[in-house]
Image (cartoon, rainbow, N blue to C red):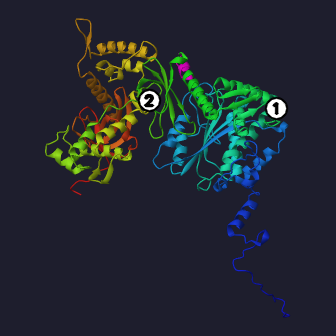
């Protein structure tokens, strides 16, 4: 060795050796990062450390989550919280809190978040039955619209329902929610942008919390699955227990005894499903099939109650078997009970009461249409947007209808008169036209169709060949999404030989769905006194009137029709014939609609400094869609045009659902015979470009 003090020797190691594990195996860079991350976050537990903590029967273990389930904020906190819960003794039992969570992807332009927040603030959710109010971390009156605008470009949104079992004993549910959210921010290491609202319209008060999908640095907020599943629930349990004290054995037994006769899936049922996978339970004294800490008398009482529903059978004294359909059947029964409670509340709000036998609960399809008045609304899934409507039908029955999706369209308001389902009416003329233009070929060409129209071989109302052909192309687009036709290019569509029949079958399937058609936005009292064309007027003028019963809403409609006749006589729109009958002109509905639209249109135009212009059949409508308004005659689109004496025109035209996403955009259309508009969107390029 040299005498130099800085002398040293390098001992080369094996190439690629970045440090070794036990046994001499090299540790990868990823392993080193994970180890450092675990050390920095308080040594987060691995899934294996929890694999035997929750058993679902003899020898069964809790299913392991995927590798990505531990990615995100809050994982270490969730692990610590679960350790703390397992270390508690019987005298430190946390009170029960149910937390439901959903992560919602927010697509650009979608109104899902708006629809959900709007519904959370509906009427009848506070203690006194008033409209609910949003609140936030520091305010009791949060601005929901401002919250939505802040999150308009967010990738996702978190929705939680936090329902303490003893919520009715809490002094301040808002204070409880704020405390839980503060602890959540500490666990996640970031400030959260959230709003919440409390609901008291069910047997169990609960809070809805909506959290933006961004952290305090503006980055996407990713929360570990374990924290969503367990961490937040434990934080809520700690807060309830802090205020009310630990749950005593006496309290717990009282709650479980109440569950013995519950018509829903309970904790006792969950224990049966998880602890007895064979679905055969031996409760004889020496069997020892149940854990020692479980009270057999509770399960005997529950099984006897399940026997009434055909879900359990005592095969021999002390030995029971239960159905594999136990959980889904009880969940369906619980949902049915919730719906019946919603119907009862809706009727009670109107001071009415009906026999249980008059309730009809529909699913997502309806074989026959239902006409009636909306008397209540509920979320079928309180974390989503699926709406359930309570309809007081003209058939004397009260219907609950589950709508497929209310995310991108506003559901009808309470008091509206609607028709739901049964919209199919046989083959469409547009389908027959497409088949005729294609002839013996399997290809339809819009250019050929346009040429036939322009040559006079096909006559159309209004004479606008472009709009007429575009309506057929839109129909083809719908059939393409259904897999019936194929788009080759803009001027070539491949169609099947049986296009008309297959398209009719497609319409029939859609017609059986719970599709809503709003017949009137005004209730019966408002329609009786209106100067517009109401649903009552259309019923009076129709040759095929809606069948009415002498009970329920059907009876109310009968009375309203007679009162509407008196109003038409007073307004001079009808007269009494020598035989005592009431007569009216054949175009009564058209006259009333024209009268109301002209009056309201002039008022709306004047308020905006514009000139009102009516629209006749075949005339072009072009301008900016600035909104919509509801009249007795229906819903109308408000269009600001560049015509008129001062270049500031204003028109009211019948609204169509296709316009929902076009507010603020330039639209063009042609008025069709019968009052509809054939729309096209965006500014059109002409030959002068």
Few, some or many residues within 10 Å of mark 1 (<14, 14–19, 20+): some
User: Left or right of 260: which side holds 654?
Assistant: left
Q: Quadrant of residue 639?
A: top left
- In the depicted view, which residue is nearer to us: 477 or 54? 54
- Magenta segment: 345-353
- In the depicted view, which residue is nearer to us: 437 or 614? 437
- Residue linked to disc 2: 366
Residue 327 % position (x, y)? 64, 34
Residue 282 % position (x, y)? 76, 32
Q: Which mark is residue 248?
A: 1
Q: Quadrant of the N terminus?
A: bottom right
Residue 531 % position (x, y)? 33, 21
Q: Quadrant of residue 351?
A: top right
Q: Residue at x 22, y 35 (%)?
A: 617
Check if residue 329 falls in the magenta segment: no
Does residue 3 appear anywhere in the picture? yes
Give the label, 1 or 2, closer to the camera. Answer: 2
Q: Which mark is residue 197?
A: none
Which secondary structure, mark 1? Answer: loop
Q: Residue at x 41, y 30 (%)?
A: 421
Q: Is residue 226 above or below residue 606?
A: below
Q: Is residue 565 above or below residue 272?
A: above
Q: Residue at x 53, y 35 (%)?
A: 119
Check if residue 346 falls in the magenta segment: yes
Q: Quadrant of the C terminus?
A: bottom left
């Amino acid at each position: 060795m040299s005498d130099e003090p800085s002398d040293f020797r390098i001992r080369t190691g094996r190439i690629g050796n970045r440090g070794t594990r036990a046994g001499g195996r090299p540790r990868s860079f990823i392993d080193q990062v994970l180890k450092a991350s675990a050390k920095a976050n308080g040594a987060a537990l691995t899934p294996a450390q929890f694999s035997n903590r929750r058993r679902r029967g003899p020898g069964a273990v809790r299913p392991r989550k995927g590798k990505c389930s531990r990615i995100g904020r809050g994982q270490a906190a969730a692990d610590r919280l679960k350790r703390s819960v397992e270390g508690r003794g019987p005298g430190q039992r946390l009170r029960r809190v149910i937390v439901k969570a959903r992560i919602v992807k927010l697509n650009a332009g979608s109104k899902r978040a708006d629809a959900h927040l709007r519904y959370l603030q509906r009427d009848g959710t506070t203690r006194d039955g008033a409209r609910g109010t949003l609140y936030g971390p520091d305010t009791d009156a949060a601005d929901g619209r401002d919250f939505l605008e802040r999150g308009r470009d967010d990738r996702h949104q978190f929705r939680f329902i936090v329902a303490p079992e003893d919520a009715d004993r809490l002094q301040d549910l808002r204070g409880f929610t704020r405390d839980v959210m503060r602890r959540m921010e500490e666990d996640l290491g970031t400030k959260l942008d959230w709003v919440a609202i409390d609901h008291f319209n069910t047997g169990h008060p609960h809070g809805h919390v909506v959290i933006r999908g961004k952290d305090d640095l503006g980055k996407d907020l990713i929360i570990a699955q374990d924290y969503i599943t367990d961490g937040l629930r434990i934080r809520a349990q700690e807060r309830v227990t802090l205020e009310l004290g630990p749950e005593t054995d006496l309290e717990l037994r009282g709650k479980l005894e109440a569950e013995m006769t519950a018509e829903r899936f309970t904790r006792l049922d969950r224990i049966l499903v998880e602890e007895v996978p064979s679905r055969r339970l031996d409760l004889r004294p020496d069997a020892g099939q149940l854990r020692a800490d479980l009270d057999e008398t509770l399960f005997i009482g529950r099984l006897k109650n399940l026997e009434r529903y055909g879900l359990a059978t005592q095969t021999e004294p002390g030995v029971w078997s239960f159905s594999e359909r136990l959980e889904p059947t009880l969940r369906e029964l619980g949902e049915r009970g919730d719906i019946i409670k919603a119907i009862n509340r809706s009727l009670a709000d109107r001071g009415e009461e009906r026999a249980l036998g008059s309730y009809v609960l529909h699913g997502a399809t309806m074989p026959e249409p239902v006409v009636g008045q909306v008397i209540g609304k509920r979320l079928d899934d309180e974390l989503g947007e699926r709406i359930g409507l309570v309809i007081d039908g003209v058939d004397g029955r009260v219907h609950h209808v589950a709508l497929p999706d209310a995310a991108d369209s506003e559901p009808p308001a309470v008091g509206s008169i609607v028709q739901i389902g049964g919209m199919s009416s046989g083959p469409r003329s547009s389908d027959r036209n497409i088949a005729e233009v294609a002839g013996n070929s399997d290809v339809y060409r819009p250019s050929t169709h346009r040429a036939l129209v322009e040559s006079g071989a096909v006559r159309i109302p209004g004479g606008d060949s472009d709009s007429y052909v575009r309506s057929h192309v839109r129909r083809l687009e719908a059939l393409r999404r259904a897999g019936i036709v194929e788009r080759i290019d803009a001027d070539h569509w491949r169609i099947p030989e049986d296009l008309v029949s297959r398209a009719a079958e497609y319409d029939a399937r859609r017609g059986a769905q719970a599709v809503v058609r709003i017949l009137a936005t005004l209730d019966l009292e408002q329609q009786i006194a209106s100067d517009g064309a109401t649903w009552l007027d259309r019923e009076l003028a129709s040759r095929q009137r809606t069948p009415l019963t002498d009970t329920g809403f059907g009876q109310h409609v009968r009375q309203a029709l007679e009162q509407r006749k008196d109003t038409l006589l007073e307004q001079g729109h009808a007269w009494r014939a020598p035989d005592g009958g009431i007569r009216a002109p054949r175009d009564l509905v058209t006259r009333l609609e024209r009268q109301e639209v002209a009056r309201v249109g002039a008022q709306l135009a004047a308020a905006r400094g514009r000139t009102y212009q009516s629209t006749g059949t075949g005339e072009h409508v072009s301008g900016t869609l600035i909104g919509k308004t509801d009249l007795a005659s229906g819903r109308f689109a408000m269009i600001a045009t560049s015509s008129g004496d001062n270049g500031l025109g204003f028109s009211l035209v019948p609204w169509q659902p296709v316009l929902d996403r076009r507010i603020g955009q330039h639209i063009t259309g042609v008025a069709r015979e019968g009052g509809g508009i054939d729309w096209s969107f965006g500014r059109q390029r002409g030959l002068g470009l």
